[in-house]
Amino acid sequence: MNAPPQVSTDRVREAGPAGLPDLADPSFWGLPRDERLAGFARLREHRAPVRFTPRTGAHPPFHALVRHADVKEASRRPHVFASAPGVTTPEPARWAKAVFGNAMVHMDGAEHAGLRRTVSRAFTPRLLTAAEENIARTARRLVDELVAGRPEDFMRSAAARLPFEVICDLMGVPVRYRAAIAAQIDDASRYAGVQRRPRLRVPGRGLRSLAGMQLLMVRLARQRRRHPADDLVSALVRADVDGRSLSARELGAFFSLLLVAGVETTRNALAHGLYLLTAHPEQRVLLESDFERYADGAVDEIVRHSTPVIQFRRTVRAEYELGGRVFVPGEKVMLLYASANRDASVFTAPDVFDITRSPNPHLGYGGGGPHHCLGAHLARLEMKALYRELLGRPVPVRAAGEPELVGSNFDHRVRALPLSYGPFHPNEPV
């Protein structure tokens, strides 16, 4: 495997306005994570939102909101800082939305509220209770396999499998479809964000994967209309938005969002969490001493410290003053969650990993408002279930090194996390 290209830190630090880091420069995202966090800290000290202009001209200029208060306020003003036409870079093309449907994450106003309300109703108490029981069973089985087989990589053996199997079980996806869907998720998510390593780009490959996934989901939806079952797909095909049924494109777009977002973010959080609990053995000992007491705090601190989703974009719809600057319609804004979650004005010793941190108003699931993560509760259940099993075994399972990251300006994606088995020795490097 080729090593990441070496980047001149001094050059990047001098590239932005007033010597600040240039978030529009792809080389900034190739820096080690600690150096990027230091760059975010300098931007927070600057206070006023900074404008960045991509050098290639392929994407429009944008302003970065890096302070906790600013990200939170913008998140709760969707009529000003809109999700449409898209929260990712690049924004979804109009033709892609027409073909594949528009994901809920890119919607605003009544359209977003109606779809979210319908989806929320489908998550009935009975469905959630069954999901929680299934999560516990699946986590136990995966850790049984982990301890018995002692694989070298945590991602492939457990972290990626748990959320994927849970989502598939929740939706009622037949086993025969799952291998194809897993491959399509990897392809669809592989092309998001600025990549650290040079790679061969295959035009349309991510869209083809998305199309394949949606075709499978539409086929399943047809089956569930004819033969309903006790699963999420059956609940959604019988649901309606404002008196009308969801179209095949709407169902496909929601299923794709749930599969990609629900799997990718949780598996990354699980991997970062195991590494953090290994790198901070005193925190692991504390969690093991009374898991039920500290588990919720541990999950929140893992999400804060790792921030699986680095940023989302917004488009300004109305003139608005924020952070000492007046924004005007049409401007693009980056909500930098990875910076907001290290804001020293909100978090004492923000770089310290502390599972007892309280309060912990992190923005790892978004900054509040109508786009707060719909799957946050499910993600917490999955993380608690897997750590409960991992930390409760006679043979300790821990990280044998740092996570291997896929360089990106969109998420803290983990390609692999090496594993080790047996007691931890204080002088042993992690």
Image: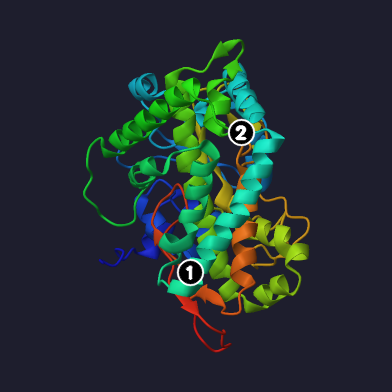
Q: Give the side of residue 184 with respect to residue 224, left or right.
A: left
Picture quarter with the N terminus: bottom left
Tell me if residue 322 comes above or below residue 393 in the rendering.
above
Secondary structure beneath dot 1 equals: helix
The image quarter containing residue 45 is: bottom right
The image quarter containing residue 324 is: top right
Q: Residue at x 53, y 69 (%)?
A: 275
Q: How far across and how far down the image is residue 109, in percent?
A: 61, 20
Tell me if residue 417 comes above or below residue 254 in the rendering.
below
Q: Residue at x 64, y 72 (%)?
A: 392
Q: Residue at x 47, y 25 (%)?
A: 251
Q: Residue furthest front?
A: 227
Visible in this render: residue 400? no
Q: How far across and how far down the image is residue 156, in percent?
A: 41, 61
Secondary structure beneath dot 2 equals: loop
Residue 416's disc is none
Q: Earlier in the sequence, mark 1 or mark 2?
A: 1
The reply to whether discs 1 and 2 touch (Cβ–Cβ < 8 Å) is no
Q: How far across and how far down the image is residue 145, in percent?
A: 48, 67
Query: Which residue has dot 2 on it?
Result: 371
Q: How far across and how far down the image is residue 312, in percent?
A: 51, 39
Visible in this render: residue 339? yes
Q: Amino acid at mark 2?
A: His
Q: Residue at x 60, y 50 (%)?
A: 134
Q: Nearer the viewer, residue 346 or 240?
A: 240
Q: Give the side of residue 103 with respect to residue 338, left or right.
A: left
Q: Give the side of residue 32 with respect to residue 393, left or right.
A: left
Label 1 crowd (10 A; few <14 / some 14-19 / many >=20): many
Tell me if residue 375 comes above or below residue 133 in the rendering.
above
Disc 1 vs disc 2: which is toward the camera?
1
Query: Which residue has dot 1 on it?
Result: 146
Q: Give the side of residue 278 with respect to residue 24, left or right.
A: right
